[in-house]
Amino acid sequence: MNQLRKLLLSSTLLFHSTKHATTTAFVVKHPSTPLSTQRFMSSLLTEQVTTPQNIELDNPTTIQKRVFQNDNRPIILFDGVCNLCNNAVNIALDWDPSGKLRFAALQSNVGRALLQANGRQADDISSIVLVTDEGAYIKSDAILKITEALTPLSMLPLKPAAVLGRVLVPKFIRDVIYDGVADNRYDLMGKREECRYDVDGSLSERFVDDLLARKQ
């Protein structure tokens, strides 16, 4: 395992870009590589690619309309440098085989625009956010709405449990528990050096293309 990490890190250094570059995920693909291994490599290998510093972005409302124009699936905005959050994304991908949900990093241009379009600060990464074409959910409400879409085992949807949790547990209690985990997420599992913006081609349609934020 240590040798694999060294090999992957060496590959990253060969492709290392300038310190002012915009980050995106870099994944080694091979047709015989199992999907679970590709995801593991994705968590180890993130790469910086150079993009122009003066890219002009559209206004947040326009970006949100564009993101949902041809695809109305909800979008999970997650902390792209948080290891705990990235592991949760991998679980959500596994438990959402029908692809009901999409993903984008809070730090991405699309993520920042969606935050602003829903009344939050562009640099607010204090909470996971679930964005739909009708509005947004944060903290425990977001977790429960996401849980409704997940099916960890065949014929075992989590929606009934999520609905029950929303009814039985008051929001302020749920949010206190959420904040306790969120505020200590870096201490629990650490953070990565660069932000996860995308994954390999087999899952690319599950991640929102950050180019949608560019002014057209």
Image: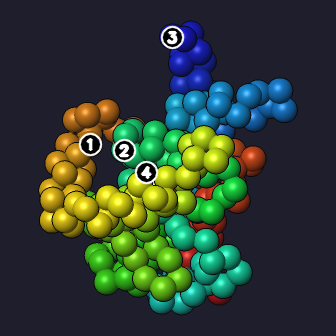
Q: Are marks 4 and 1 in contact (CB under 8 Å)?
A: no
Q: Mark 4 is on which residue type?
A: Gly
Closest to the observer, 126 or 100: 100
Residue 205 pos. (x, y %): 70, 59
For this rendering, which residue is in front, 99 or 60?
A: 99
112 displayed left or right of 102? left
Toward the right, the furthest residue is 31
Query: Which badge, 3 or 1, is on the more N-terminal residue?
Result: 3
The tag earlier along the polypeptide, 3 or 4, is 3
Q: Which mark is residue 62?
A: none
Mark 3–mark 4 distance (CA, rounded to whole Å) = 24 Å
What's the CA distance linking mark 3 and mark 1? 25 Å
Quadrant (top left, top right, bottom left, bottom right) of the C terminus: bottom right
Q: Helix or strand or loop: what does disc 1 sit on?
A: helix
Is the C-beta separation of discs 1 and 2 under 8 Å?
yes
Real-space CA distance between mark 4 and mark 1, rounded to the nearest whole angstrom? 12 Å
Q: Which residue is mark 3?
A: 2
Proximity of marks 2 and 3: CB atoms separated by less than 8 Å: no
Identify the residue at horizontal 58%, vertical 62% (top origin).
101
Earlier sequence position, callout 2 versus callout 3: 3
1 or 2: tag closer to the N-terminus: 2
Mark toward the viewer: 4 or 1: 1
Circle 2 crowding by C-alpha within 10 Å: few under 14, some 14–19, many from 20: many
Q: Which residue is mark 2?
A: 82
Judging by the rendered image, the residue that carries numbered circle 4 is: 80
Asked if labels 2 and 4 touch by Cβ distance under 8 angstroms, the answer is: yes
Residue designated by label 1: 185
The span from disc 4 to disc 2 (Cα, nearest Å) is: 6 Å
C-alpha distance separating marks 1 and 2: 7 Å
Where does the image place residue 6, in percent across and percent down from the top left?
Answer: 54, 16
Residue 153 in view in this figure: yes
